[in-house]
Image (cartoon, helix red, strand yellow):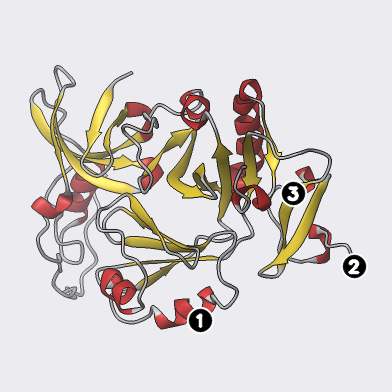
Amino acid sequence: MKIINCPLNGPRNSSEFVHGGELRQMPDPNNCTDKEWADYVFYSDNQIGVITEWWLHAPSGYWFIAERHTGSDEILRTYDPSEIFTHRVDFAEKVESGQPEEIKA
Amino acid sequence: MTVIKPELFNSRSFIYRTHQQAEFAEVAGAAQVLSYAQQGDPTTGLIDLSVRPRIGLRGPNAEEALLASGLLHPQQPNTLTVSDEGVMVLRLGRTEYWVLALPGASADLDLDALQQQLNGPGIYPVYCHDSYTWLALAGENLADIMAKVCAVDLREESFAPGDLVMTSLARVGGIICHHQMAGKTVYSIFSDSASAGYLWEALLDAMAEFDGAPAGQNLLLVADE
């Protein structure tokens, strides 16, 4: 079985981990367009190369960040999210436009 | 005198129906197994401690509150401390703590009062009583038994007393804590209450070849001669 190195718990079987998707910059959820939000939630780049992802160590409920090569599936580095998230992320208040957003099929 | 049975209490262990031949005592408004009547103490016992009191807290200020209350603070993540009063403190990750009353804890220990005291901004209660089952594996060959159900190396060289691991055992998530009681090695195991019945059976099955048997908390209080 593959071994993933959890920054908190050490090397563990990959069956203890849950993939949490690619780490991406979240658009301001109050003021972005639906398209921008859908792009953030539903679409990923799916390119070959090193990507930065969220992973969960399920038995301890611990989320961390891993850098993985999508071609070789090799995990190059894992680290605690505090390396990236050094302070609380806040977003601006919602700006009321008065007009409903246009939805295209 | 009334014979104490789990059915006398509203609060019960998740697997109280499996303790048919056991003697009980009242602990925190529920029935705790003291011993299994029809057998002597096994060399390796599996003990259901699910009804024993425990509280949890987490948050950036949890460490400070824990130190202020005079509890022994585990210095490293994934370690534990045991005090002379029978209080075990688990540090799960960086900022989550569980405080548990071991069998034989002093009678004036009031964890509900402590939970009130461990309060304030940056401290959040963690509910860990009825959502988790607490099984204690005590005696000999523990690392060999656990090797059958768990991928992590739990031999003494890599899993010393005072260590804990959060991993999957018998394919369910759980916390395994290594401590000593009455001169015995004890692995306290915490797992989701929904899998309590399964885990009890799975561990007994793994113990069978090492002459393991169900036991009560007296096994953790009386030292072997």
Q: Residue at x 15, y 62 (%)?
A: A28
Q: Earlier in the sequence, mark 3 or mark 2?
A: 2
Left or right of residue A20: residue B192: right
Q: Residue at x 53, y 27 (%)?
A: B145
Q: CA distance from mark 2 to mark 1?
A: 29 Å
Amino acid type, callout 3: Ser
Q: Which residue is mark 3?
A: B35
Q: CA distance from mark 3 to mark 2?
A: 17 Å
Amino acid type, callout 2: Thr
Q: Residue at x 66, y 24 (%)?
A: B208
Left or right of residue B5: residue B35: left
At numbered mark 3, what does the secondary structure look like: helix, strand or loop?
strand
One can see residue A84 in this view: no
Relative vertical location of residue B80 with respect to residue B62 in this rendering, above or below = above
Looking at the image, which is closer to me, A36 or A87?
A87
Q: Which residue is mark 2?
A: B2
Disc 2: host chain: B
At numbered mark 2, what does the secondary structure look like: helix, strand or loop?
loop
Disc 1: host chain: B
Label placed on residue B113: 1
Q: CA distance from mark 3 to mark 1?
A: 29 Å
* Badge 3: residue crowd in 10 Å (few <14, some 14–19, many ≥20): many
Q: Residue at x 46, y 76 (%)?
A: B115
Q: Residue furthest right?
A: B1
Residue B18: x %, y % from top left = 77, 43
Q: Are marks 3 and 2 in contact (CB under 8 Å)?
A: no
One can see residue B158 in this view: yes
Looking at the image, which is closer to me, B38 or B154?
B38
Q: Earlier in the sequence, mark 3 or mark 1?
A: 3
* Badge 2: residue crowd in 10 Å (few <14, some 14–19, many ≥20): few
